[in-house]
Amino acid sequence: MSDIEFRGIEKTYPDGTEAVRALDLRIESGSFTVFVGPSGCGKTTSMRMINRMVDPSAGTITIDGRDIASVDPVKLRLGIGYVIQSGGLLPNRKVIDNVATVPMLLGRPRKRARADALEVLDRVGLDRELAQRYPAQLSGGQQQRVGVARALAADPPVLLMDEPFSAVDPVVRAELQVEMQRLQAELHKTIVFVTHDIDEAITLGDRIAVFGRGGVLQQYDAPDRVLAQPATDFVAGFVGRDRGYRALSFRTATDLELTPIRTVAADEVAGLRLAQGEWALVVDADGKPGGWVDVTGVEGVRAGNPVATSVSAGGSLFTRDGDLRQALDAAISSPSGIGVAVDGEGAVRGGVLATDVLTRLARQREAEDAERNREFFEQGVS
């Protein structure tokens, strides 16, 4: 068990700045909790209190019921994994020695620590060949993976992550988020993750703690409830006007009806005849999408010879086990207005229209309303 509890936590700096006010919060063991909010709202300060990098001005923090103020800070930190931006790696040590740092500090023999480090690199999806490189020889995404590996090397029950993915590009960031979801499903650590990005919070968190300016906790709830029922005007504003769109990520698209798509091979594009307004999806030999073609030759259209002459980049893709947000995004980002559904291998399985997504959403809501009415009736009868 690794429950973390904040009781009456305050943090005021010598200059009078109130970083955290009246924080009461219980983080359940094995959960992925995200602290989110604008800059200067106390989210990072609150997280750093867990490993005593910051001490509260008042209140108590416990881990498994034990007051951390009674634990030696160094010993406490050795039992808590910590990941920061850019990995925070030691530049003069090879990757394998960076990962083995904490186990060695805990007394594990160097040979054993290095062997265990290789296994942790496997776990976070890094090639063992990178073990002998220095941090500067790695990409930003690889450095972050090494940072996660180092935090996990001693198998700590608690993992703190301070905006770890904010310094990498959006593509790598999405990959790292998926990797964290996979690792958490496998390891079930108690994770506290700090970010200012509400989309990242919704993607990763089992629970979200939204902090407002002045270090006041505004709402602590499941991500779908934060989106659907913001507790304060601040939360509603921070989540954004498009919170309804974000909430679609909690609605399944598994039974969404697909529309047939006309597909063509790349070598068939030249001279392909299409009706005006018609689109065709270019696919490779494995059936994977490569872009859309339509009638682009204006003179050809006037002459009654509508021939496709160029390929437009496709929109985002979604898989059948995805959610309604992914399906709708695929539809509205596609130049043809048709979202492309692919299987696990990336091959095209059909298309989806935005109107179909909205129809499916309406049906799900009707089913939810019927279930609520049924429960209300049964409670009234009983």
Image (cartoon, rainbow, N blue to C red):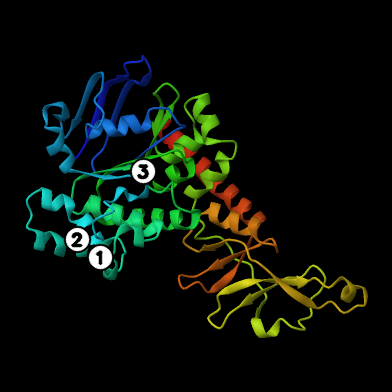
Foreground pick, 115 / 246: 115
Q: State the residue at coordinates (81%, 78%).
A: 307
Residue labelled with disc 3: 206
Q: For mark 2, give the secondary structure.
A: helix
Mark 2 — residue?
117
Q: Is disc 2 in contact with disc 1, using a CB cutoff of under 8 Å?
A: yes
Q: Image check: 349 left or right of 301?
A: left
Determine the residue positioned at 50% across, 37% down. Answer: 227
Residue 103, position as x, y percentages in the image: 13, 52
Q: Earlier in the sequence, mark 2 or mark 3?
A: 2
Above/below status of 225 relative to 17 = below
Nearest to viewer (mark 2 / mark 1):
1
Q: Residue at x 62, y 62 (%)?
A: 315
Where residue 53 appears, x then y in whole percent?
24, 32
Q: Earlier in the sequence, mark 3 or mark 1?
A: 1
The amino acid type, in three-letter code, at marker 1 is Ala
Q: From where the camera sits, is residue 179 visible?
A: yes
Q: Position of residue 119 (x, y in %)?
A: 20, 64
Disc 3 versus disc 1: distance between alpha carbons? 33 Å
Front-lying residue, 117 or 337: 117
Evaluate whether residue 182 shows in this view: no
Task: Tell me, yes or no, whether the two marked residues, 2 and 3, touch with CB atoms within 8 Å.
Answer: no
Q: Where does the image place residue 80, in percent across and percent down from the top left?
A: 20, 42
- Distance between mark 2 and mark 1 Cα atoms: 9 Å
Element assignment for label 1: helix
Q: Secondary structure at mark 3?
A: loop
The disc label shown at residue 131, or none: 1
Q: Quadrant of the N terminus?
A: top left
Residue 225 in the figure: left or right of residue 129: right
Report crowding for label 2: few under 14, some 14 to 19, many 20 or more residues within 10 A (C-alpha): many
**What residue type is disc 2 on?**
Ala
Within-10-Å neighbours for mark 3: few <14, some 14–19, many 20+: some
